[in-house]
Amino acid sequence: MMNDMGNVGRDSAASEIKIQARGVQVFYGETQAIKDVSVDILDKSVTAFIGPSGCGKSTFLRCLNRMNDTIDIARVEGDIHIDGDDIHAPGIDPVQLRAKVGMVFQKPNPFPKSIYDNIAYGPRIHGLARNKAELDEIVERSLRRGAIWDEVKHRLHEPGTGLSGGQQQRLCIARAVATEPEVLLMDEPCSALDPIATAQVEDLIDELRQSYSVVIVTHSMQQAARVSQRTAFFHLGSLVEYRETGQIFTNPEDPRTESYITGRIG
Amino acid sequence: MATTVFLALLCVSILGYSLNRQAAARMRANGTKLHSVPGYHGLYSLLSTIVPVVVLIVLWLALQGPTIDRFTMSGLPAGSLDELETGGRQLILAEIKSISRGRVFGNPEAWKVDAADRYVWMHAVAGWMLFGVVIVASLGIVGFARSRVAADFRARHGVERITSGLMLFCSTIAIFTTLGIIAALLFESIRFFERVPITEFFLGLNWEPQIPLREDQVAAEGAFGWIPVFLGTLVITVVALFLAVPVGLLSAIYLNEFATPRLRAVAKPVLEILAGVPTVVYGFFAILVVAPAIRSFGATLGIPVSPNAALAAGSVMGIMLIPFISSFTDDALSAVPKSLRDGALALGATRAETVLNVLFPAAIPGIVGGILLAISRAIGETMIVVMAAGLIASLTINPLDSVTTVTVQIVTLLVGDTSFDNPKTLAAFALGMMLFIVTLVINVFALRIVRKYREAYE
């Protein structure tokens, strides 16, 4: 499965491996949610996780920034290395890890604060700005990268919860970007958005690829095809197929992948 | 008699239900398309019988007693009520009533026994009349309802109207009770202010309500300034909040965010036990444990502490309020969507940062509401302060002094030798009125704050 890593991707600036996962298993109590998943995620590219509901793709995504630690009954086994460092090593602080591996959630979740404070929250707790001017600059830069600056620049001090759903989601992306992460995890970021907002977020993802390694979980195969360079297909907790996106959609190797993308399972 | 009447009404209305239901069912069986299903035609009959007739019975029973009393009195032999005032007449009526129940003391006059017989007879007649009226009325309504069963009769809408009317009635009961309480307080307070100038009550700095009730009693002139009394309430409330707010907030945050599930499973119920402790037990605790402890601690520091210091009553009241505040905070924190928590954690916030910067602001409306309700409770709390606070109203904000509270004064004014025509007892109603107004204002304020924040954060 891994043998077509060297294939020429569509405009994929294929580069070094950012995240390396080996034999990852996740248990919720007695139930096994992820079975022996090994995957290499490249830097400066978009990787899509597709698969039917409950196949474990979100669970696997949450392994990458150790968000599963916050669930009492969840247990993660296996090795995950980011930039060669084991994220489960005793010396690794999950709080530090999450600053480096940002995350955007399915439902927009702006904090009950102003737009400005939403963005400034991460930089503040991590001490990224030395003074107000620097913080202002980070906020503006993040909002610009989130493609929402023009819409909110006149009302930075109004509550972020007052924005529309699509704006809220772009605000959340800008918030995740503001802490200068190296990896951005997106868990179905467009599922609560209308087509126009979805298109805006997808454009944004394409731009973010210049600087980050982006991993996106999506239910929409069209979206995976549009935004990603590589695609992983999950089924019943296992990684079935992981290849260059164009290939997985035109020429799937595994019959289960073919069934899913042609709409027979899922 | 009342039971029989109600049973009869129930039977008739059930009869009406089945009549209507069967009639409608027959129509439907014959192929007519009904607007409402047969069950609603039945219910329509049932409700439109029961509701008005029950109202009729209640009104009848309410008027029956006074009417019969009047007939009894007017039927007495001429001259037997001469030279009697209201009190005397009522005594005679009471005597006749007790004879009618068979409780005869001594040898009553023959005319009283006659009157008692007539009293019994009138009650029996009235009962049968009620029975007859109820049967006629309910059968009439049943017949009327039966006549309305038709294909296009909107029984379902009729039932809807009647039930929503019933609900409206129930929801206004609470409102009217509140209005009644306000009216009672207001009238007595007005009587108080007829005797004591309103400026003295609101601006006076002295509270010495022990005025002579009878000619031969020796007591002071009396002074009715509510400021020292209310100040005492404030001092105790502030002490209580200083203890309850931080402890309640932090314990709720700990239990909600940091505690392991096992600890939480034990600690939460234990905290809730505190809420179930009767306030009189808190009173014991204040007198027997807290007050002596504070006093001896003060003695070691060389600070004089009054035996019933505001600090003792206030801190025990604070303990009482802890579960109140912590359960409100707990609910408010639990109500914050998990997505916000995840969002903050995913940005690399620690648990404490998440709680402080994200969860707490989102939970503020609930927390503020809880604190303000706790203040209302502290102001109105009676038993702890009756037991542990003082009786003398002194103008002080020192929590080590003895202070009294509004509730304590109300209790002492209304306990023992009372009559409701002197400023001493009427003062209790004026205090109660003020207590009511203050808590009302706080509650309105609490609701407004909660609403304002909710608008901003949803």
Image: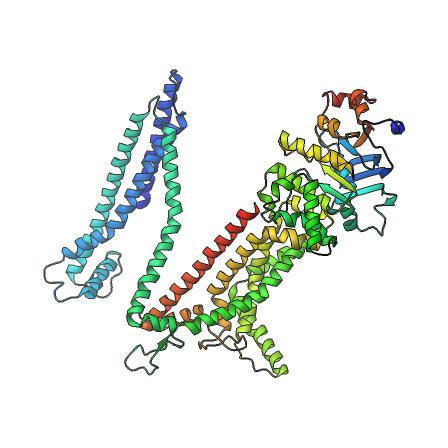
Quarter-of-image position of residue A104: top right
Is B240 situated left or right of B140 in this image? right
Residue ranking furthest to the top: B31
Q: Position of residue B52 (x, y in %)?
A: 30, 39
Q: Is residue B94 visible?
A: yes
- Report whether B138 appears left or right of B401: left
Is B272 or B118 nearer to us in this picture? B272
> To which quarter of the image does residue A4 belong?
top right
Q: Quadrant of the C terminus of chain B?
A: top right
| Coordinates of residue B113 in the picture (x, y in percent) | 18, 58
* Residue at (45% x, 55% y) in the render: B444
Residue visible at 26% across and 58% down?
B102
Q: Is residue B403 above or below residue B70?
A: below
Q: How many marks?
A: 0
The residue lying toward the viewer, choosing from B265 and B407, is B407
- Quadrant into which the N terminus of chain B falls: top left
Residue A108 visible in rendering: no
Query: What colouring does the structure picture have?
Result: rainbow
Relative height, residue B266 to residue A177 (above, below):
below
